[in-house]
Amino acid sequence: MKQTKSISMPVGMHRVKITMAFPLRWVNSYVLHEPDGTITIVDPGPRSAETEQEWYEALAGLNLTFQDIKQVVLTHHHPDHLGLSGWIQQQTGAPVRMSTRSRQEADYMWGPDATINRLLPEYYGRHGMPEDKTEQIGGHMEGFNSQITPLPVVTPIEDDEWLVMGGKKWLAVETGGHAPGHLSFYAPDSREILCGDAVLPQISPNISLQPGSDDQPLLSYMEGLHRLGALDVEVAYPGHRNPFNHFADRTVHLLTHHEERLQKMMERIREAPTNAYDVCVLMFGDRLGTHQLRFAMSETLAHLQELIRREVIVQKQQPDGVFLFIENT
Protein backbone atom coordinates (compact mmCIF):
# COMPACT_ATOMS: atom_id res chain seq x y z
CA MET A 1 0.00 0.00 0.00
CA LYS A 2 1.22 3.48 -0.79
CA GLN A 3 2.49 5.62 2.05
CA THR A 4 0.56 8.78 2.88
CA LYS A 5 2.76 11.82 2.42
CA SER A 6 2.25 14.97 4.45
CA ILE A 7 -0.45 17.10 2.84
CA SER A 8 -0.98 20.75 3.69
CA MET A 9 -4.52 22.01 4.16
CA PRO A 10 -5.66 24.35 1.37
CA VAL A 11 -6.29 28.05 1.91
CA GLY A 12 -9.69 28.51 3.48
CA MET A 13 -9.85 25.10 5.22
CA HIS A 14 -8.56 24.09 8.63
CA ARG A 15 -8.49 20.67 10.26
CA VAL A 16 -9.37 20.58 13.96
CA LYS A 17 -8.52 17.40 15.86
CA ILE A 18 -11.23 16.69 18.42
CA THR A 19 -10.54 14.20 21.19
CA MET A 20 -12.29 10.83 21.15
CA ALA A 21 -11.78 7.42 22.74
CA PHE A 22 -8.84 5.09 22.19
CA PRO A 23 -7.72 3.61 19.82
CA LEU A 24 -8.52 6.36 17.29
CA ARG A 25 -7.80 9.18 19.80
CA TRP A 26 -9.13 11.98 17.62
CA VAL A 27 -11.65 12.69 14.90
CA ASN A 28 -11.00 15.19 12.14
CA SER A 29 -13.35 18.15 12.06
CA TYR A 30 -13.01 20.56 9.17
CA VAL A 31 -13.57 24.31 9.25
CA LEU A 32 -14.31 25.80 5.84
CA HIS A 33 -14.14 29.59 5.59
CA GLU A 34 -16.88 31.28 3.57
CA PRO A 35 -16.30 34.45 1.50
CA ASP A 36 -18.58 36.44 3.83
CA GLY A 37 -16.47 35.64 6.91
CA THR A 38 -18.68 32.85 8.27
CA ILE A 39 -17.67 29.20 8.47
CA THR A 40 -19.03 25.74 7.81
CA ILE A 41 -18.03 22.98 10.23
CA VAL A 42 -17.96 19.41 8.95
CA ASP A 43 -18.27 16.72 11.68
CA PRO A 44 -17.74 18.57 14.99
CA GLY A 45 -16.93 15.44 17.03
CA PRO A 46 -18.37 13.77 20.16
CA ARG A 47 -19.75 15.83 23.00
CA SER A 48 -18.00 16.08 26.36
CA ALA A 49 -16.82 18.93 28.58
CA GLU A 50 -13.35 18.42 27.09
CA THR A 51 -14.47 18.65 23.47
CA GLU A 52 -16.66 21.69 24.15
CA GLN A 53 -13.57 23.45 25.49
CA GLU A 54 -11.54 22.30 22.48
CA TRP A 55 -14.01 24.08 20.20
CA TYR A 56 -13.87 27.30 22.24
CA GLU A 57 -10.07 27.22 21.92
CA ALA A 58 -10.05 26.21 18.26
CA LEU A 59 -12.40 29.01 17.23
CA ALA A 60 -10.49 31.56 19.29
CA GLY A 61 -7.28 30.42 17.61
CA LEU A 62 -8.88 31.19 14.24
CA ASN A 63 -10.17 34.57 15.47
CA LEU A 64 -13.74 33.25 15.32
CA THR A 65 -16.66 32.76 17.69
CA PHE A 66 -19.62 30.41 17.69
CA GLN A 67 -21.70 33.17 16.11
CA ASP A 68 -19.55 32.90 12.98
CA ILE A 69 -20.83 29.36 12.32
CA LYS A 70 -23.07 29.42 9.26
CA GLN A 71 -23.88 25.71 9.19
CA VAL A 72 -22.81 22.32 10.53
CA VAL A 73 -22.60 19.53 7.96
CA LEU A 74 -22.40 15.86 8.99
CA THR A 75 -21.06 12.93 7.03
CA HIS A 76 -22.93 10.40 9.20
CA HIS A 77 -24.66 9.70 12.50
CA HIS A 78 -21.92 8.09 14.59
CA PRO A 79 -21.23 9.89 17.91
CA ASP A 80 -17.67 10.88 17.00
CA HIS A 81 -19.05 12.82 14.03
CA LEU A 82 -22.57 13.94 14.98
CA GLY A 83 -22.08 14.34 18.72
CA LEU A 84 -21.60 18.09 19.25
CA SER A 85 -23.90 19.20 16.43
CA GLY A 86 -27.03 19.59 18.56
CA TRP A 87 -25.09 21.47 21.22
CA ILE A 88 -23.61 23.84 18.61
CA GLN A 89 -27.09 24.35 17.18
CA GLN A 90 -28.31 25.32 20.65
CA GLN A 91 -25.49 27.88 20.98
CA THR A 92 -25.88 29.41 17.54
CA GLY A 93 -29.17 28.52 15.87
CA ALA A 94 -27.12 27.32 12.89
CA PRO A 95 -28.71 24.68 10.64
CA VAL A 96 -27.38 21.14 10.92
CA ARG A 97 -27.34 19.22 7.65
CA MET A 98 -27.08 15.47 7.05
CA SER A 99 -28.84 12.82 4.98
CA THR A 100 -32.36 11.77 5.87
CA ARG A 101 -31.21 8.18 6.36
CA SER A 102 -28.46 9.28 8.73
CA ARG A 103 -30.95 11.17 10.87
CA GLN A 104 -33.21 8.11 10.90
CA GLU A 105 -30.28 6.00 12.08
CA ALA A 106 -29.60 8.47 14.91
CA ASP A 107 -33.19 7.99 16.10
CA TYR A 108 -32.83 4.22 15.69
CA MET A 109 -29.75 4.26 17.93
CA TRP A 110 -30.62 6.96 20.50
CA GLY A 111 -34.12 8.27 19.91
CA PRO A 112 -36.89 8.07 22.54
CA ASP A 113 -38.17 4.78 21.13
CA ALA A 114 -34.75 3.17 20.59
CA THR A 115 -34.46 -0.48 21.65
CA ILE A 116 -31.00 -1.28 20.29
CA ASN A 117 -29.46 -1.45 23.79
CA ARG A 118 -31.65 -4.51 24.44
CA LEU A 119 -31.80 -5.95 20.92
CA LEU A 120 -28.07 -5.99 20.20
CA PRO A 121 -27.00 -8.14 23.20
CA GLU A 122 -29.85 -10.57 22.45
CA TYR A 123 -28.80 -10.69 18.80
CA TYR A 124 -25.19 -11.43 19.69
CA GLY A 125 -26.32 -14.14 22.13
CA ARG A 126 -28.22 -15.92 19.36
CA HIS A 127 -24.98 -15.92 17.40
CA GLY A 128 -22.92 -17.61 20.11
CA MET A 129 -21.51 -14.75 22.17
CA PRO A 130 -21.14 -15.83 25.84
CA GLU A 131 -23.54 -14.29 28.34
CA ASP A 132 -20.83 -12.52 30.34
CA LYS A 133 -19.91 -10.60 27.21
CA THR A 134 -23.44 -9.82 26.01
CA GLU A 135 -24.19 -8.33 29.43
CA GLN A 136 -21.45 -5.77 28.90
CA ILE A 137 -22.79 -4.67 25.50
CA GLY A 138 -26.00 -3.02 26.76
CA GLY A 139 -24.24 -0.81 29.29
CA HIS A 140 -21.59 0.04 26.73
CA MET A 141 -24.28 1.24 24.30
CA GLU A 142 -25.93 3.45 26.93
CA GLY A 143 -22.61 5.22 27.45
CA PHE A 144 -22.98 6.99 24.10
CA ASN A 145 -26.05 9.00 25.10
CA SER A 146 -24.10 11.84 26.70
CA GLN A 147 -21.93 12.15 23.58
CA ILE A 148 -24.88 12.90 21.25
CA THR A 149 -27.30 14.87 23.47
CA PRO A 150 -29.15 16.85 22.28
CA LEU A 151 -29.81 15.42 18.84
CA PRO A 152 -30.02 18.23 16.27
CA VAL A 153 -32.93 19.44 14.21
CA VAL A 154 -31.79 18.47 10.72
CA THR A 155 -32.11 20.10 7.32
CA PRO A 156 -31.74 17.12 4.95
CA ILE A 157 -29.14 16.71 2.22
CA GLU A 158 -30.11 14.54 -0.73
CA ASP A 159 -27.81 12.29 -2.74
CA ASP A 160 -26.32 14.22 -5.71
CA GLU A 161 -27.24 17.57 -4.12
CA TRP A 162 -24.76 20.44 -4.52
CA LEU A 163 -23.62 22.31 -1.40
CA VAL A 164 -21.56 25.47 -1.19
CA MET A 165 -18.92 25.16 1.54
CA GLY A 166 -15.83 27.28 1.84
CA GLY A 167 -16.75 29.12 -1.35
CA LYS A 168 -16.62 25.85 -3.36
CA LYS A 169 -19.32 23.64 -4.83
CA TRP A 170 -19.37 20.14 -3.35
CA LEU A 171 -21.44 17.21 -4.60
CA ALA A 172 -23.07 15.03 -1.93
CA VAL A 173 -22.38 11.34 -2.58
CA GLU A 174 -24.47 9.00 -0.40
CA THR A 175 -23.13 5.51 0.28
CA GLY A 176 -23.74 2.85 2.92
CA GLY A 177 -21.97 0.07 4.75
CA HIS A 178 -20.03 1.90 7.42
CA ALA A 179 -23.13 3.94 8.22
CA PRO A 180 -26.45 3.97 6.36
CA GLY A 181 -26.85 7.32 4.61
CA HIS A 182 -23.16 8.24 4.87
CA LEU A 183 -22.32 11.34 2.83
CA SER A 184 -19.03 12.22 1.20
CA PHE A 185 -18.60 15.64 -0.40
CA TYR A 186 -16.75 15.90 -3.71
CA ALA A 187 -15.44 19.13 -5.25
CA PRO A 188 -14.75 18.27 -8.93
CA ASP A 189 -13.15 21.62 -9.76
CA SER A 190 -10.39 21.14 -7.17
CA ARG A 191 -10.53 17.30 -7.16
CA GLU A 192 -10.98 17.17 -3.38
CA ILE A 193 -13.24 14.95 -1.30
CA LEU A 194 -14.39 15.14 2.30
CA CYS A 195 -14.92 11.41 2.73
CA GLY A 196 -15.80 11.01 6.40
CA ASP A 197 -15.36 7.34 7.30
CA ALA A 198 -16.31 5.93 3.89
CA VAL A 199 -12.63 5.62 2.93
CA LEU A 200 -9.82 5.87 5.49
CA PRO A 201 -6.13 5.93 4.60
CA GLN A 202 -4.69 3.31 6.95
CA ILE A 203 -7.53 1.46 8.67
CA SER A 204 -10.54 -0.38 7.32
CA PRO A 205 -13.82 1.36 8.25
CA ASN A 206 -16.02 -0.85 10.40
CA ILE A 207 -18.87 -2.55 8.54
CA SER A 208 -21.59 -3.59 10.99
CA LEU A 209 -24.68 -5.75 10.68
CA GLN A 210 -27.20 -4.71 13.32
CA PRO A 211 -30.82 -5.80 13.77
CA GLY A 212 -33.24 -3.27 12.31
CA SER A 213 -30.69 -1.45 10.14
CA ASP A 214 -29.18 -2.21 6.71
CA ASP A 215 -29.54 -5.96 6.20
CA GLN A 216 -26.73 -6.11 3.58
CA PRO A 217 -24.10 -3.66 4.89
CA LEU A 218 -21.06 -5.21 3.24
CA LEU A 219 -22.76 -5.23 -0.15
CA SER A 220 -23.74 -1.58 0.42
CA TYR A 221 -20.18 -0.71 1.35
CA MET A 222 -18.57 -2.42 -1.63
CA GLU A 223 -21.04 -0.83 -4.04
CA GLY A 224 -20.19 2.54 -2.46
CA LEU A 225 -16.45 1.93 -2.89
CA HIS A 226 -16.98 1.35 -6.60
CA ARG A 227 -18.91 4.61 -6.86
CA LEU A 228 -16.39 6.63 -4.88
CA GLY A 229 -13.41 5.04 -6.61
CA ALA A 230 -14.69 6.27 -9.97
CA LEU A 231 -14.35 9.91 -8.88
CA ASP A 232 -11.31 11.91 -10.00
CA VAL A 233 -9.79 12.70 -6.60
CA GLU A 234 -6.43 14.29 -5.97
CA VAL A 235 -6.73 14.89 -2.20
CA ALA A 236 -9.01 13.18 0.32
CA TYR A 237 -9.87 14.57 3.76
CA PRO A 238 -10.91 11.63 5.97
CA GLY A 239 -12.65 11.46 9.33
CA HIS A 240 -9.60 9.78 10.93
CA ARG A 241 -5.87 9.84 10.37
CA ASN A 242 -4.35 12.30 7.89
CA PRO A 243 -5.37 13.66 4.49
CA PHE A 244 -4.11 11.46 1.66
CA ASN A 245 -3.73 11.43 -2.11
CA HIS A 246 -4.12 7.79 -3.20
CA PHE A 247 -7.91 7.73 -2.91
CA ALA A 248 -8.77 5.50 -5.89
CA ASP A 249 -6.03 3.00 -5.00
CA ARG A 250 -7.32 2.92 -1.44
CA THR A 251 -10.83 1.98 -2.57
CA VAL A 252 -9.36 -0.93 -4.53
CA HIS A 253 -7.30 -2.01 -1.53
CA LEU A 254 -10.39 -2.00 0.71
CA LEU A 255 -12.36 -4.07 -1.78
CA THR A 256 -9.53 -6.61 -1.88
CA HIS A 257 -9.32 -6.62 1.92
CA HIS A 258 -12.97 -7.58 2.28
CA GLU A 259 -12.74 -10.30 -0.35
CA GLU A 260 -9.79 -11.79 1.53
CA ARG A 261 -11.76 -11.64 4.79
CA LEU A 262 -14.72 -13.39 3.15
CA GLN A 263 -12.39 -16.11 1.86
CA LYS A 264 -10.88 -16.72 5.29
CA MET A 265 -14.32 -17.06 6.88
CA MET A 266 -15.44 -19.40 4.11
CA GLU A 267 -12.42 -21.63 4.70
CA ARG A 268 -13.30 -21.89 8.39
CA ILE A 269 -16.93 -22.81 7.69
CA ARG A 270 -15.84 -25.49 5.20
CA GLU A 271 -13.95 -27.20 8.03
CA ALA A 272 -17.09 -27.49 10.20
CA PRO A 273 -20.34 -25.62 10.91
CA THR A 274 -19.70 -22.77 13.31
CA ASN A 275 -21.38 -19.82 14.98
CA ALA A 276 -20.59 -16.17 14.34
CA TYR A 277 -18.86 -15.63 17.67
CA ASP A 278 -16.35 -18.38 16.96
CA VAL A 279 -15.69 -16.87 13.54
CA CYS A 280 -15.26 -13.47 15.22
CA VAL A 281 -12.63 -14.89 17.59
CA LEU A 282 -10.84 -16.49 14.65
CA MET A 283 -10.70 -13.18 12.79
CA PHE A 284 -10.11 -10.72 15.63
CA GLY A 285 -8.90 -12.67 18.68
CA ASP A 286 -10.47 -13.10 22.11
CA ARG A 287 -8.92 -10.19 24.03
CA LEU A 288 -10.97 -7.29 22.71
CA GLY A 289 -12.50 -4.65 24.95
CA THR A 290 -16.27 -4.24 24.83
CA HIS A 291 -16.25 -1.45 22.23
CA GLN A 292 -13.94 -3.31 19.86
CA LEU A 293 -15.79 -6.58 20.46
CA ARG A 294 -19.04 -4.96 19.31
CA PHE A 295 -17.34 -3.72 16.15
CA ALA A 296 -15.72 -7.11 15.52
CA MET A 297 -18.91 -9.11 16.09
CA SER A 298 -21.06 -6.93 13.85
CA GLU A 299 -18.31 -6.87 11.20
CA THR A 300 -18.18 -10.67 11.29
CA LEU A 301 -21.96 -10.89 10.92
CA ALA A 302 -21.85 -8.44 7.98
CA HIS A 303 -19.40 -10.71 6.16
CA LEU A 304 -21.36 -13.85 6.96
CA GLN A 305 -24.48 -12.19 5.61
CA GLU A 306 -22.63 -11.47 2.36
CA LEU A 307 -21.63 -15.13 2.10
CA ILE A 308 -25.30 -16.05 2.55
CA ARG A 309 -26.24 -13.59 -0.19
CA ARG A 310 -23.68 -15.21 -2.48
CA GLU A 311 -25.32 -18.58 -1.67
CA VAL A 312 -22.10 -20.24 -0.52
CA ILE A 313 -23.27 -20.72 3.09
CA VAL A 314 -26.61 -21.08 4.87
CA GLN A 315 -27.68 -20.18 8.39
CA LYS A 316 -29.54 -22.71 10.55
CA GLN A 317 -30.87 -22.30 14.08
CA GLN A 318 -30.03 -25.09 16.52
CA PRO A 319 -32.29 -26.45 19.29
CA ASP A 320 -30.53 -24.22 21.83
CA GLY A 321 -31.47 -21.16 19.73
CA VAL A 322 -27.96 -20.41 18.51
CA PHE A 323 -27.43 -20.01 14.76
CA LEU A 324 -24.78 -22.01 12.94
CA PHE A 325 -23.30 -21.18 9.53
CA ILE A 326 -22.93 -24.16 7.21
CA GLU A 327 -21.42 -24.55 3.75
CA ASN A 328 -24.11 -24.62 1.09
CA THR A 329 -23.41 -27.83 -0.83
Image (spheres, grey):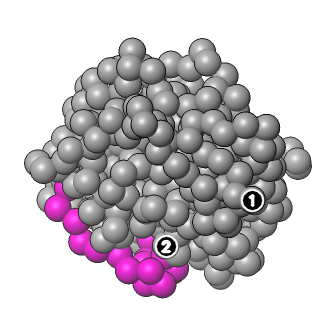
Whether residue 310 is in magenta: the answer is no
Q: Residue at x 33, y 56 (%)?
A: 212
Residue 206 shows in the view: no
What is the three-letter code of the residue carrying label 1?
Answer: Thr
Q: Residue at x 79, y 37 (%)?
A: 271
State the residue lying farthest toward the right. 2
Q: Residue at x 44, y 80 (%)?
A: 159
Front-lying residue, 249 or 297: 297
Residue 270: mark in rendering: none
Residue 174: mark in rendering: 2
Disc 1 target residue: 329
Front-lying residue, 104 or 150: 104
Magenta-drawn stretch, dominant element (helix, strand or loop)? strand
Secondary element at tag 2:
strand
For the record, the magenta segment spans 152-172
State the residue lying farthest toward the front. 319
How far across and how far down the image is residue 74, in percent? 38, 59
Tag 2: Cα neighbours inside 10 Å, few (<14), some, or many (≥20)?
A: many
